[in-house]
């Protein structure tokens, strides 16, 4: 059967949203709303797979929502909500716990990375959350998901779960009038330049909120002075910028800064090098400061304004959750019929 095209994506409310989050995800969300029906979720249930301070979780949920709004996502045209307000996510995740195989989850590299050596002490939620991620997507029968490199494996799992559900319940799916498949095979959406933004202190490491040095990242709430200082202090090598993109492969810090410039200006690394190839880093950094302040300054200011009005943010999330639930409950009702649960 043909599925209605729909985009789903989620962002964890873990605090300190930075340039990597903005360029790797949020800018894509803004662009996609021009061409797709989009559902954007603050995935607070995923956040608690590791312990969260309750007050910080509340604050961070509102901050992510503020970033969505400040960046240009229209809450009237698209759905913005937080995951925990739509219980169908957890309901479908349990069904998927019974569809997914242990061997599939054992291959998930992110669990191994996050749990570290002390895996016996990790939460069951951290182990099983890829099933919840699959439920997040498929409870809306979403057809497309914008994902970074670190989430491709989880999207593959969602596709495997969808296929196995469709196979396991094929006769019931047909009997209930859904044709050959109830769930779609969600497709990854290709990302643009600088989707993987690296640390300003080490071009071989991903920009991260957990880095001990605040100078390693540009936070979305940084003011113009902080943005300028961090860019000017960013690690570089002693050579001028190259003229050929291929030369960036061996120069991670140069590659990172050129990629950031390209993404902020919505152009390519090759175009950036046409303009700045052969220039000293001091010249290039001044241009990058001007561009970053112009692009990020208004977003940070608007975020601070929105965070100062939690009642407004909560109203956006409440409205979004009602609209999201209308779709999710329809999916979940059908799943219960397909699986064979007795309903009133």
Image (tube, rainbow, N blue to C red):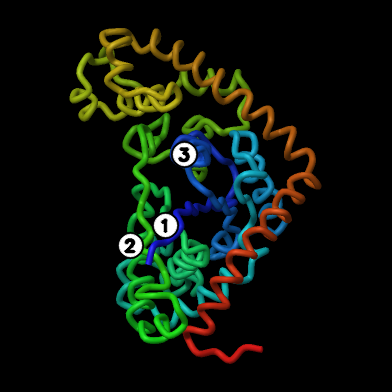
Q: Spatial distance from mark 3 to mark 2, Cα to Cα?
A: 20 Å
Question: Considering only vertical position in the picture, is 133 above or below 236?
Answer: below
Task: Please tell me which of labels 1 and 2 falls first in the chain.
Answer: 1
The residue wearing badge 1 is 143
**SS label for mark 2:** helix
Image coordinates for residue 100, horizontal then vertical, percent: 38, 77
Q: Residue at x 40, y 49 (%)?
A: 147
Contact check, label 1 and label 2, Cβ < 8 Å: no
**SS label for mark 1:** loop
Q: Residue at x 50, y 23 (%)?
A: 230
Task: Please tell me which of labels 3 and 2 falls first in the chain.
Answer: 3
Task: Please tell me which of labels 3 and 1 falls first in the chain.
Answer: 3
Q: Spatial distance from mark 1 to mark 2, Cα to Cα?
A: 13 Å
Callout 3 crowding tier (Cα within 10 Å): few <14, some 14–19, many ≥20:
some
Query: Which numbered dot is residue 28?
Result: 3
Q: Is residue 212 shown to the viewer in this render?
A: no
Image coordinates for residue 89, horizontal then vertical, percent: 56, 68
**SS label for mark 3:** helix
Q: Residue at x 53, y 49 (%)?
A: 38
Q: Residue at x 40, y 35 (%)?
A: 197
Question: Considering only vertical position in the picture, is 92 above or below 305?
Answer: below
Q: Is residue 159 shown to the viewer in this render?
A: yes
Image quadrant where residue 57 sits = bottom right
Image quadrant where residue 272 sits = top left
The residue wearing badge 2 is 156
Question: Considering only vertical position in the picture, is 243 above or below 4?
Answer: above
Callout 2 crowding tier (Cα within 10 Å): few <14, some 14–19, many ≥20:
some
């Amino acid at each position: 059967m043909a599925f209605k095209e729909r985009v789903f994506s989620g962002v964890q409310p873990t605090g300190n949203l930075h340039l990597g989050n903005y360029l790797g995800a949020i800018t894509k969300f803004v662009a996609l709303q021009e061409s797709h029906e989009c559902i954007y979720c603050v995935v607070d249930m995923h956040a608690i797979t590791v312990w969260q301070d309750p007050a910080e979780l509340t604050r961070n949920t509102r901050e992510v929502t503020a970033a969505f709004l400040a960046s240009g996502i229209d809450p009237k045209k698209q759905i913005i909500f937080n995951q925990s307000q739509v219980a169908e996510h957890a309901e479908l995740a349990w069904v998927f716990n019974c569809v997914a195989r242990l061997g599939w989850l054992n291959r998930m590299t992110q669990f191994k990375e996050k749990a570290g050596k002390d895996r016996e002490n990790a939460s069951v939620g951290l182990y099983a959350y890829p099933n919840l991620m699959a439920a997040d997507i498929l409870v809306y029968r979403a057809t497309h998901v914008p994902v970074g490199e670190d989430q491709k494996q989880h999207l593959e799992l969602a596709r495997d779960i969808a296929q196995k559900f469709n196979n396991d319940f094929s006769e019931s799916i047909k009997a209930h009038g859904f044709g050959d498949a109830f769930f779609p095979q969600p497709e990854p959406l290709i990302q643009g330049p600088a989707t993987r933004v690296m640390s300003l202190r080490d071009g071989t490491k991903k920009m991260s909120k957990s880095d001990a040095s605040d100078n390693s990242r540009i936070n979305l709430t940084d003011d113009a002075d902080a943005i300028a200082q961090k860019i000017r202090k960013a690690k570089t090598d002693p050579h001028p910028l190259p003229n050929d993109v291929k030369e960036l492969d061996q120069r991670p810090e140069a590659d990172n800064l050129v990629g950031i410039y390209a993404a902020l200006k919505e152009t390519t690394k090759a175009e950036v090098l046409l303009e700045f190839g052969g220039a000293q880093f001091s010249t290039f950094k001044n241009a990058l400061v001007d561009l970053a302040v112009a692009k990020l300054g208004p977003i940070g200011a608007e975020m601070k304004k929105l965070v100062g009005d939690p009642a407004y943010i909560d109203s956006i999330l409440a409205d979004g959750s009602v609209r999201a639930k209308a779709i999710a409950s329809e999916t979940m009702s059908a799943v219960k019929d397909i699986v064979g649960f007795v309903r009133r």
